[in-house]
Structure formats: C-alpha cells, structure tokens
Amino acid sequence: MDIKEKNKLIRKVNSLLLKKFGKPYRNEKLPDPVDLLIATILSQNTNDNNSYKAYQNLKKKFPDWKMLLGVSASEIEKEIKIAGLGKQKSNAIKNFIESLYKENKSLKLDTLKNKENISAIKKLTEYKGIGVKTASCVLLFAFDKDVCPVDTHVHRTVNRLGIVQASTPDKTFFLLNEKFPEGIAHSFHTNLIRLGREICKPKNPACGICPLNKICKYEEKIFENSRKNENRSFMLLDNV
Ligand code: SF4
C-alpha cells in the first residue's frame, strides 16, 4: 500500500471511529512537555487509573520537578509504587530530569517544538529509559503534532485492519507515521485505543459490533462474539 492509500484508509477509519465513539476528550490547554513525559513513563504496563494516582502522588510530593534533582531513585519509587515497575520507572525519571538539567540548566523541552518529528523522537530517545512510544506521546499530547503513538492496542488494530504490516510496535510506528494525515492524530490514536480495549481485543475480537468490520482485512474475524468490554475511555495523558 502506498502512502496515499494508507492515509486514505487512516482517514476512513478515523471518521468511522468518530461516528462510533465521538470526539475524544482533550484538555483545552496543552500540558507541559516534561509533565507529559513523566506521566507517560508512569503509564507503561499499567492502567490509566493507577498511573494517574502515581502521577498525582509524585506531583504532590515534588511540585517542582527541580526538587527531583536532589533525591534518590528510591525516594521517587516510594511515590509511584501503585503504577508498578517502580525501580525501572524511578530510574528513568531521575535519569531524564538530571540529564535534561545538565544539558540546558533548566527543565524545559520547548526547543523540540520546532524540530521535525523524527529528529525530535531521536533526541528524546537518547535519554536512557525513554522509548519511541514515550517520545511520540510527548509530540502528540504536549506539542499537538501530527504523530500517532503506537502502543499495544494501536499496533494490534492497525495491523489487523491492514493499514500496515509490521511485527513490533516500533516498526508499526514508523510505517504508520510516514507523512501522517494532518489534524486527526489525537482522535485516531485515542479512539483506536478505545476500540482495542472494548471491541478489538487481543483474543476474541467482537467483529460483529465493530464499526470497521466492512473495511477490516483481518482474516480471523469473529462474528459470534458480540460482547464489548466495559467503557474504559479515561486517558491519563489527556488529564495531565
Ligand atoms: S473487524 Fe474485528 S479484527 Fe477488524 S478491527 Fe474490528 S474487531 Fe478488530
């Protein structure tokens, strides 16, 4: 599939998902990129409710991220326990804050705003513990760029739909984001996650009630199972 066809399909999927789920909630004011990056680290491998609580705990204890410069990773870990992977996440947060401050003598990421998307991702992934997904969330949620981050739900659904064919989320990310269509990345990303959580589940997708079943290329569609998971539309990164 060439880029033109890929983008046409992305737009079609986006409009069908908007019809089904509506326009996803988004804070009117874009969050601070450093806040967003820390929230994204906390969101790995856990649900949005737990990572939201961990984020609130951390922010309450350290209202200014500069305060993290003087603390040990274990002090950070204490505050974020509820989100799991405490050691890994606290080390990633500490390393990021210290490296950023060392480089800029401030905790700002604003210079990334004018960078081209792929070089901004390259820059962010140079920090130990920050992967392509975290970097791309910063670009979408904090800078409102035309970038669709790829988590496990987006990876599974865009591959089933036939928009890309790739074996890992990072490979999917680079194929999906080649000249991504303008102005729809937030709704496409957020509604696809909702589709993946409620309908296009890893096992037993509920294809019978899926708004995309006429255009989906997945060969193992299941029509007997029309049960949808509960509505799980709360998204941490729209509430930072
Ligand atoms: S038709 Fe089935 S496999 Fe395709 S996107 Fe919908 S739920 Fe997923």
Image: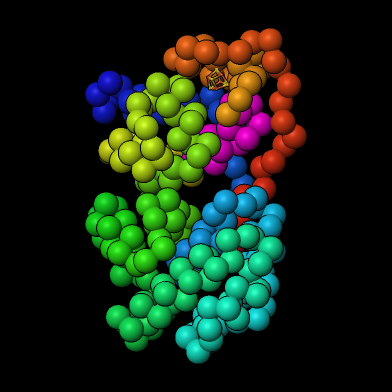
Residue 123 is left or right of residue 93, and the answer is left
Residue 3 % position (x, y): 26, 28
Decide which of 120, 159 is in the foreground and name it: 159
Name the quadrant of the C terminus. Answer: bottom right
**Above or below, 230 relative to 25:** above
Residue 51 is left or right of residue 128, and the answer is right
Q: What residue is drawn where x is 40% and y is 80%?
A: 98
Residue that sits furthest to the bottom in the current view: 70
For the stretch drawn in magenta, the main secondary structure is: helix
Name the quadrant of the N terminus. Answer: top left
Q: Picture quarter containing residue 223?
A: top right
**Above or below, 107 relative to 115:** below
Find ligand 1 in the image and state its quadrant.
Answer: top right
Q: Is residue 225 visible?
A: yes
Decide which of 83, 206 is in the foreground and name it: 83
Residue 40 % position (x, y): 52, 59
Q: What residue is drawn where x is 31% and y is 70%?
A: 111
Asked whether 195 falls inside the magenta stretch, the response is: yes
Residue 91 % position (x, y): 48, 71
Q: Is residue 30 visible?
A: no
Asked whether 37 falls inside the magenta stretch, the response is: no
Q: How many marks?
A: 0
Q: What residue is drawn where x is 65% and y is 74%?
A: 79
Q: What residue is drawn where x is 41% and y is 63%?
A: 129
**Above or below, 42 relative to 198:** below
Residue 238 is left or right of residue 161, and the answer is right
Decide which of 194, 132 is in the foreground and name it: 132
Residue 132 % position (x, y): 37, 52
Q: Which residues are magenta?
A: 188-201
